[in-house]
Image: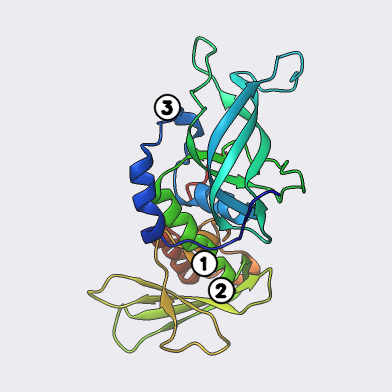
Amino acid sequence: MKRLILPVLLSLAAIAPVAAQTGALPLAVPHDRLSGFADTAELALAAPVIVRATITRASRISSKGASDVAPGRARFRITASVSSVLAAPDALGATLHYLWDAPVDARGRPPQTKGLDILAFLAAPKTDGSTRLVSRRAQQPWDSALVDTVRAIVTDQRSGKVPMISGVSNGFRADGTVPGESESQFFLTSADGKPATLVVQNRPGEVRRVLLARGDIIDESAERVLAGTLLWYRLACFLPARLPARAGGDDPALAKDWRDALASLGPCGKTD
């Protein structure tokens, strides 16, 4: 009977020492590396199954049998032994099988894969262990820092507290009692219906504050938006670059506060 691995969300403290002991082989393929937090979030949110595994077999499929492979890549049938589970809806078998379009070097040689310790982002497997990668970059060399980031994203997603931002519906701006002091509030729309208001506070001599209020009442519970979090990703990557006219974009001061807020968040940085 196949050994089952129960789905758990692992702590970094529990898994990092193991990574150090295995001496995982490097996968020197820069263009398949994730360029930043947004790329990692895309994978973590798209994959119902995220596992640590070791490649035990990699069989190259001939170009005739993989005619749809993009130039600069070679298709492999991967067999991987699961060592731990970061996320999964159900128990998993100990072995998974999937196809991987590996990048090749200038001589057409793929990276060394057998024995490689990996982090794989996968679709839910069938009973025989067959599955698929959720994207071409969904097989990554094992890295404890990457796991720490993925773990935080999955934890935030499971909490249900981070709204899925889809746009902005309205905004207004009010001047304060001191010259140069103001506060703008932008009411955001969300795909999951959760209330969210982006608050931009300008005070003389202070760094602009960009906050998010998650309830119907905007008070001191509004929190700063920190880079490298699921909340930051859903704001920086899904808000429009310009404030729509229907949301107050015709007001120059309000539109400037919107631009300044996005500048404070920084660019999304997502790559194809």
> Measured along the vertical axis of the image, is residue 207 above or below residue 183?
above
Callout 2 crowding tier (Cα within 10 Å): few <14, some 14–19, many ≥20: few
Name the residue that disc number 1 marks. Answer: 155
The image's mark for residue 28 is 3
Report the residue at 73% width, 41% height from top: 130
Q: Using the image, tell me which numbered label, if any, was put on residue 186.
A: none
Of callouts 2 and 3, the N-terminal one: 3
**Mark 2 = which residue?**
159
SS of the residue at dot 3? loop
Where residue 136 sits, quadrant-wise, is top right
Question: Quadrant of residue 129 in the image?
Answer: top right
Residue shown at 40% from the left, 36% from the top: 24
Q: Earlier in the sequence, mark 3 or mark 1?
A: 3
Q: Mark 2 belongs to which amino acid?
A: Ser
In contact (CB < 8 Å): disc 3 and disc 1: no
Q: How far, Cα to Cα, is label 2 from label 1?
A: 6 Å
Q: Secondary structure at mark 2?
A: helix
Circle 1: is it few (<14), some (14-19), or many (20+) Cα within 10 Å? some
State the CA–CA distance, disc 3 to disc 1. 30 Å
* Depth check, front residue: 57 or 265: 57
Task: Assess whether mark 1 and mark 2 are in contact (beta carbons under 8 angstroms).
Answer: yes
